Every structure is written in structure tokens, then in C-alpha cells.
Amino acid sequence: MLSICGMDCCDRCDRRGDCGGCVQTQGHPFGGSCVAAECVKKGGAQGLADCKSALIGEFNRLGIPHLHIEELHLLNGAYVNLEYPLPGGQTVKFLADNQVYWGNQVEIPGSERCYGLVAGEGFLLVAEYGCQGAQPELVLYKRREAGPAAPQGKEK
């Protein structure tokens, strides 16, 4: 097995030579950390499933038009760490290139743009961008109370 979580991300990764291997690095590929490996370390296979389920629910409850997901994938930070323009003209990156995050992409109906979703330890990020990440705009950056497996509040 190449990965701690049992997912086939290692087999599909074109940066595998730079990674060092999930198992070999104890869940710290590229010198950073992997959200899936951390979920498994904290709660095993069930912890991983709970983590993904909780994050999918959080993204779907954001109330952003046309944003609904059924799945999250593991994505290397180097691929999803876009530079976002700020009102003063500067640009900023919110992610780390050496981390592995949960993420997905959702096409916006009637538009040539997409939503990009990224979740890591303690945050959710939603961006809107064009083809190949062109002209990214930050839609939402939200801190979470805890990491990827944050417990949901009790409904009243």
C-alpha cells in the first residue's frame, strides 16, 4: 500500500517522485501534511469517512448558488494554490504548495467559470475562476472550529 488512507492518490500523482511516499513519510508527503492521513491517524477508516462526510455537508450548507458536491478528492496544494487579487492591488495565496487538501471543482451553469473548493485543517475555501484557474476570485474563506473531522453542533 502506497498511502495511509488506502486511496489511490499515489498511483495517480504525477509528482510522486517529489513526494517521498505517504507511508514512507508517515503522512507528510512533499514535506507538508495530508488531510486524509491525519483523519486516518485520528480515527482509522471510519474517521476518514466521517471527515469527508462532514466536509461535504459543510460545503453543501454554505448556501452558494449552484454549489453542491457529492465527493471530495485529494489535491496537492501546488495545483490549487491560486493567487487571489486583493482590493489594494496585491495578490495573496492562502494555501501551502506542500500540503495535500480535500477539494473539488463545480461547473457554474450558464457560465464558463467554475467553483473551486478546498478544505484543510481548520478552514474551508471557495473560489470562482475561469479555464485553468484564470482570473480567480475568492468567494469564501471560513475558519472551522476544529480540523477536518469537526463535530457538528446539535440541532434544536
Image: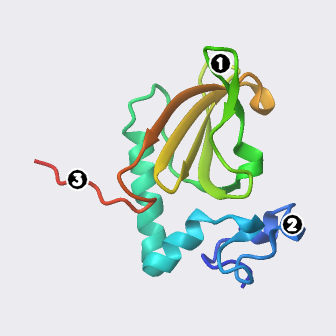
* Residue 13, horizontal then vertical, whole percent: 81, 63
Classify mark 2: helix, strand or loop: helix
Nearer the observer: mark 1 or 2; the answer is: 2
Kindly identify the residue that appears in the image at 45 percent across and 77 percent down: 42
Quadrant of the rendered image containing residue 128: top right
Q: Nearer the viewer, residue 107 or 122?
A: 122
Mark drawn on residue 15: none
Left or right, 15 with respect to 75, comes to right
> Residue lying furthest top in this view?
88
Residue beneath disc 2: 18
The answer to whether residue 73 of the structure is visible from this angle is: yes
**Where is residue 56 drawn, in percent x and y?**
45, 50
**Residue 59 placement, left or right of 152:** right
**Three-letter amino acid code of the residue under disc 2:** Asp
Q: Are marks 1 and 2 in contact (CB under 8 Å)?
A: no
Q: Disc 3 residue type?
A: Gly
Quarter holding the N terminus is bottom right
Q: Secondary structure at mark 3?
A: loop
**Residue where numbered disc 3 is placed:** 153
